[in-house]
Image (cartoon, rainbow, N blue to C red):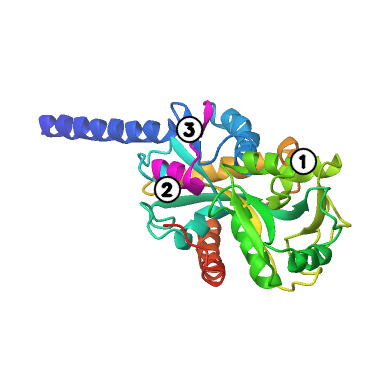
Amino acid sequence: MHRSRRTAALALGVFALACAGEEVGAQAYPSKPLRVIVPYPPGGGVDAIARAVAPRLSERLAQPVVIDNRGGAGGNIGTEIAARTAPDGYTLMMGAAALAINASLYAKLSFDPVRDFTPISLLASTPNIVTVHPSMPVKTLRELIALARTTRGGINYGSAGNGTTSHLAGELLRSMAKIDLVHIPYKGTTGALTALVGGEAPLMLAPALTVLPQIQAGKLRALAITSSKRSSVLPDLPTVAESGLPGFEASQWYGVLLPVGAAPEIVDRLNREIVAVLKLPEVSQALARDGSILVGSSASEFSTYLKSEIDKWAKVVKASGARVD
């Protein structure tokens, strides 16, 4: 009888230690540096948002958060890398609107934006600005449309690459305004912005945070904003809808995702910390100055939003005839 009690006590002790070990293991996350894959080159809007959030997230997690730029193929190269990494919570990905666009734009993808990823939080959205080089003899979107209709061969517009928001927003403008625009893809937003400032591709529908400094410095001219409402940063700038194309809306968005399969407690922890970072005055004010609208959604809200964006852009891609093999 004494031996039975001792055996039972020993078993309970082992069980308690196992439970304690599991609890310690759960509390240990993260125990090493985190990597955030940005599937675009440095200097663009997605990269800027990631670098604004990463240092503060590092402080809250007490671990380094390293940005890993893996640009190429409209974001698909970095996205595929992220999709194939272990779902242990140590590799995150900065997603953008192109993640939804590419689902219908590309004939074949090696990943599925819904099945292969677990959304963590939608960080922010940034409207595009219809921007032209000052040499263009237009001051409003209506004037641009009129000029395009009388320009033989059309007007060149630059983008950050095939399938990016700046590309599809331009295609949406072309189809809705019934004008001739010639798409000139560049390797990332930085290349497209350089071409815009230099007058090589004198038109671009670019993320507000990318072109605001040049607009404010007088190096570029803003004609309209692609959001449904005017921006507090440029309150006198009309929307595209106000400028004669009702229903036009095309905004860039930014969110954090994990490879599918991450533990629910890791998803919850990252969501909680990221939302907290977005509420920090230094982060929220910095992003607002660049024209971004902060969101900080739950994981489920981001999941629903991602699916709705895939459906929305599928219709735009089909209507525009855009396609990448």
Q: Residue at x 35, y 32 (%)?
A: 20
Q: In x, y percent, where is residue 72?
A: 48, 42
Q: Residue at x 56, y 68 (%)?
A: 320
Q: Are marks 1 and 3 in contact (CB under 8 Å)?
A: no
Q: Amino acid at mark 1?
A: Gln
The spot of residue 168 in percent (x, y) is: 59, 60
- Answer whether residue 78 is magenta in the image: yes
Q: Toward which corner of the image does residue 24 lie, by quadrant?
A: top left
> Taking the image as drawn, is residue 298 in sight?
no
Q: Position of residue 47 (x, y in %)?
A: 60, 38
Quick one: label 3, few (<14), some, or many (20+) residues within 10 Å? some
What residue would you read off at disc 3? 35
Which of the image's four quarters has the N terminus?
top left
Q: As shown in the figure, which amino acid type bears the numbered disc 2? A: Pro
Which mark, by number, is residue 285? 1
Instruction: Point out which mark residue 264 bears.
Output: 2
Relative to 240, 186 lies left or right:
left
Q: Earlier in the sequence, mark 1 or mark 3?
A: 3
Q: Of the residues shown, which amino acid type is indicated by label 3?
A: Arg
Which stretch appears magenta?
Answer: 63-81
Is 84 covered by the magenta stretch?
A: no
Query: Helix, strand, or loop for circle 3?
Result: strand
Q: Which mark is residue 97?
A: none
